Image (tube, coloured by chain):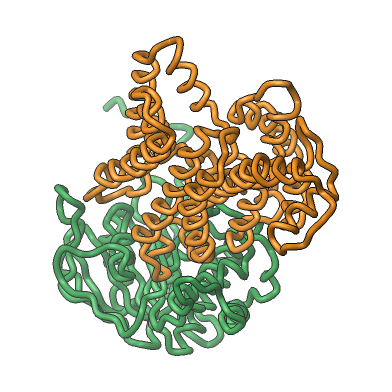
Chain colours: A green, B orange
Amino acid sequence: MLELEGVGFRFPRRDWIFRGVSFCVPPGTVTAILGPNGRGKTTLVRCAAGLLSPQEGAIRHNGPVGFVPQAHGGAFAYGALDMVVMGRVRQVHLFATPSTGDRVAALDAMDRVGIAHLHDRQFPTLSGGEQQLVLIARAIASESPVLALDEPSSGLDLRNQAQILSLLRKLVADGLAVLLTTHHPDHALYLDGSVVLMGSDGVSTGAAADLLTDKGLSDLYGMDVRTVAYRQDGTDRRAIVTRYDDGPPARPPREAPRRAPDRRSRRTPRAPTLD
Amino acid sequence: MAVVLVGVTLVALSVGRFPVPFLHVVQVVASHLFGIEGSASAVEGNVVWLVRLPRVVLALLVGGGLGIAGAALQATFRNPLVSPEIIGVSSGASFGGALALLLGLGSLFLVAGAFVFGLAALAILFVLTLDRAGAPMLMVVLGGVVTGSFFSALVALTTYVADPYTTLPAIVFWLLGSVASATFAKVLVAAVPILGGAVVLVLLRWRINVLSLGDEDATALGLRPSPLRWVVLVSTSLIVAGAVAVSGVIGWVGLVIPHLARMWVGPDHRVLLPVSFLMGATYLIVIDTLARTVTAGEIPLGVLTALIGAPAFFVLLRRNRDKIWDSA
């Protein structure tokens, strides 16, 4: 359980980044934070994870929040298992080193994430997707009931994105409370939980299916965004369609495609009449 | 590595202006430690026990201390360019020592001055970084550079006003670093802070791993980075101040030894910290033995550590480029 109530944050001598943010992530659910760059998604998830202290409001959780940062190289070439074992820092006594039990817990976490075979690899030699999985395993090894992830799928290819998403669904099904930031409305739709939209006129929260509509997404990103319905494995799903140039809004695909202009008439403009 | 260190220590005790057979060295040490009588002569006993042993033990302590301090600081600042000099404690300690020499005070004041001003540099660093939100690690590095420059300027001032015929050579030679004036009293003075600091660092070896991930990761995992970083800083300052107090400024060891150790055993500080101590100790004993045997006079240690260490380090760096630091 993770609960934010009226949370507001500003850096010293700056304007408020956000104010009055309230939402709740009960166990076994997922909440995705969406919004354009610079609206404070990462700041919000860091507040939730206790890395930043908000100036107002309250954050409650039923145990430590396991924070998963964006994958980064790090200064030292530690082994993957050593990285995951570091998630056990709360369980290891000040002057002690991790016990066999801690290593077993770390290996369990790696197994749960599906990367037990990587345990003897050096962290910097892993691919971006593998590094992200190691960091998730590290948060799981800490036995936190809440996971907070900062853009877990950024910089990953499609297949790795899919792997992270299905892992997150599995962890939610196992009863973890998961909070993440993402730039992919698709992912929020797939995870099918709640969303926190950090728009230009304030923060709105609700179910992903309710808020991630054509209008909601277009307003959020200030551009034309449409969703397309399709069926997969007997489930109705929606995908995001947008356009990458400045042209007129994309048309919903069910309408007839715009007719191509008549070539002939374009090549030979109508002769002006003399009358 | 511990075996190598013991071997190097015994060899260092046997070579010198008055060569003592290796077996006799073992006998002398054994007779003092365990009361076993051997066939070594009384002169050999005095040379080994009273002249060479304090010096070798001092080199061991200083080298080991600088090695482990460098390894811990490189982890704390996540930066390969960091050495014990970076936090300004060496400069502070050298000013303390230089000041004592300038005022013509005894060797007791030399040690005390170096120690006090070394810790004063740390205190200044602490005040400089107080109440600075944002980038605490950057503030520590900048504060260290500022403190170091300040005390370096004071050292320069000291040498400028020193009598060029008497005190100036003494100050310069002391600043170049040497363990030549070793006595058992000095060994004791050095041993308390150096071993104390080293023990704390070794106890915290795994936490230092977590700290080396960076402040954000450490916080996220449930480790408050700032208090731990200050414990590491205080421990390394004790070590450095103790080392400078008895032997002057011996550069290079704290920078290079951690790299060599990392090439050999990897970055895990559970192993790296003790190995850095042993390698630093071995290295400085070897260098000091060369310093007193290669020429008739004494070569300053600070000069030799760099003259021998720099090319050796360069060769190793070329060979192990990929192993030490990742591309990040």
Q: Nearer the viewer, residue B308 or A120?
A: B308
Image location of residue A65, percent across then percent down? 37, 76
User: Is residue B116 in view?
Assistant: yes
Q: Residue at x 62, y 47 (%)?
A: B57
**Total numbered circles:** 0
Image location of residue A113, percent across then percent down? 58, 77
The quadrant of the picture occupied by the N terminus of chain B is: bottom right
Residue at the farthest top position: B165
Name the side, left or right, on which B140 lies relative to B194: left
Image location of residue A200, percent across then percent down? 21, 57
Above or below: residue A274 compared with residue B139 = above
Q: Quadrant of residue A151?
A: bottom left
Q: Residue at x 55, y 60 (%)?
A: A156
Q: Quadrant of residue A137?
A: bottom right
User: Is residue A255 in view?
Assistant: no
Residue at the farthest front position: B42
Above or below: residue B182 compared with residue A13 = above
Q: Nearer the viewer, residue A44 or B313?
A: B313
Q: Residue at x 32, y 86 (%)?
A: A26
Above or below: residue A103 compared with residue B168 = below
Q: Nearer the viewer, residue A180 or B118?
A: B118
Q: Quadrant of residue B59?
A: top right
Image location of residue A249, percent across then percent down? 34, 54
Name the side, left or right, on which B100 lies relative to B273: left
